[in-house]
Amino acid sequence: MFVSRFDGQSKLLVRSLLCGTSGALRALDVFHRQQRVNPDMSLCPFMETLCQDEVTCPQTEAQPLTVEPLVCLFPALFKHNLLSFIYLVHSVLPRPAVLRLLKCLTQDPHPSPWVIALVRQLERTTGTHHDPPLCTPPCSQRLKELSQRLVGFAGTGGWAACLSGPTVNSDSQHASGSSELRTQRKRKGSFVMLDSDCEETGQWSKRLKMDVCGDERSAKEQTSESAAPAETLDEDLQPAPDGPGDALPEHIKVSVLQIKELLESQTEWDQISMEVFKVLNDCDPSQVEVFCSMLSFPDLPEQTLPNLCSSILAPALDFSYSTAATLIRSLLLQKVLSLSEPASRCLVTAVMSLCSRYPRPVCHALIGPVLEEKNIGNSQAELLNRLIEGCLDSHYRLLVLQMIFKISWSEAVLSVIHSLLDSKPDFSEELFTQFSEQLLSQGPQFTKSVKFAKMMLTVLTKYNSHVTAAHKHSLQGCLMVNETFLKKSLQAALKRITHT
């Protein structure tokens, strides 16, 4: 597409106009928001870019290069929405700019009848076209008849079912065989275009390809298809889903395009830019997964994280647990797992800001999966320790400790446990018993580990009030196999614990 020709504000308008039959209203909403931020904003640069000449390459070498206005190179859906949008805001636009755009649209070598009608209507509105009105008395009568026919088509089929019936019957009196099927397919394709909720450029081109492929089918397939009902023919002509994004509602697709544009830009995000993230409040968990996948969150460069997290943490957004967990997992997990050196400032800031706002989702979507990874190193442990010390309260520290009980310990995990113990979590009797059992079961692999010995010394000095006689007896056996220089200190600390 030619979106790169436009400036930052105009790109958002172009994205809105490219999406669905409601593109004009979406563009109007974007325009009003931009005006609230900058009352002096003008659409003249946007319209001037649309009127710029663009050289187009021929389809074959025998054809010469052609020069057309940029607006003529966009799909028909964009032109429909553009003219509807211009009609809504023409009162605040310079008349010469509007007339120039209309003149450019008349240079389209393959004009759409709908575009021609909208151009004439705008010319009438601006006082440059004096033909009779579009809605003549015969036209009004035809519309009334059509409205009466629509009464019986409230179910499936829509416009296609309503309009195709008599048309196909009329054609059947003059054609047969494959020519009849091709006529029905062409007309059916046009009605599907009317019924479609979102005709983006990719779907538009794909529909053309499907029409060509349909004409090349064998005579046997054509005969069987001609006997199929209209609904079946509709399904054959519908384009196959291009990807997971097809499951998203149109307004979410628009926001995905706008956010992608923001992520690729090098400019500071303003308040209006951040508001596009409000669409996440309308997403269910599966849609959030698709949303993150379409934006390639795991592959985003770390320098984009501060702006992105500032938008996600805006006061107007208050995500559910599942939405927050999906965002955190998609955005941060792979980046943390792939650390081979201390985390960058951007990554640390992003993780800590999200953890402060959504501690429980961070525990389950980030800290837990990192701990379960067998090959985590000091870089991951250092980042987790910063979260424990700076973002998690006692309740969530205990939650992390319970997660550690379910995994096999390593030197990096010992560092995290030591950080948890230094934060003085509020141990219950049951939880401390589980911890002591883990010390016994995991201890044999750390007989020469100084880090494990220091952790044991912390338990025996800072948490001696939790050590019961049963704990003391079992821990004594654990210390007997210790081979570090701290063995005598550990035994002395255990001996000092008395019970009344």
Image: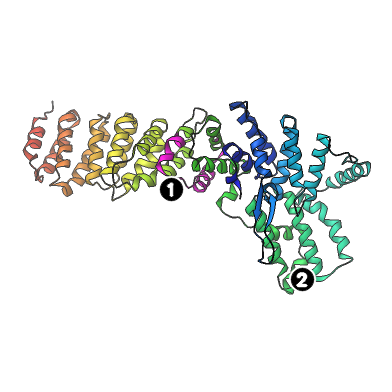
Q: Which is more toward the observer, 333 or 161?
A: 333
Is residue 360 inside the magenta stretch? no
User: Residue 422: x, y in percent?
Assistant: 23, 31
Kindly identify the residue that appears in the image at 76 percent across and 64 percent down.
228
Residue receiving disc 1: 299
Query: Dot 1, crowdedness within 10 Å: few (<14), some or many (≥20)?
Result: few
Q: CA distance from mark 1 to mark 2?
A: 50 Å
Res. 268 visible in picture: yes
Dividing the picture into quarters, in which one does residue 424 lie? top left
Task: In the rendered view, tell whether residue 393 sits above or below residue 195.
Answer: above
The residue lying at 75 percent from left, 70 percent from top is 222
Q: Is residue 496 left or right of residue 57?
A: left
In front: 150, or 14?
14
Q: Helix, strand or loop at disc 2?
A: helix
- The boundaries of the magenta stretch are 281-309
Q: Identify the amino acid type marked 2.
A: Thr
Work out which quarter of the rendered image holds the C terminus and state it.
Answer: top left
Near mark 2 (Cα within 10 A), the count class, few <14, some 14-19 or many ≥20, is few
Helix, strand or loop for the magenta stretch, by majority: helix
Q: Nearer the viewer, residue 494 or 378?
A: 378
Task: Return the x and y of residue 287 as percentages of the image width and height.
Answer: 54, 44
**Label 1 is placed on what type of residue?**
Asp
Q: Position of residue 68 (x, y in %)?
A: 70, 51
**Residue at numbered disc 2:** 223
Dot 1 or dot 2: first in sequence order is 2
Q: With respect to residue 402, does 185 lie above or below?
A: below
* Mark 1: secondary structure: helix
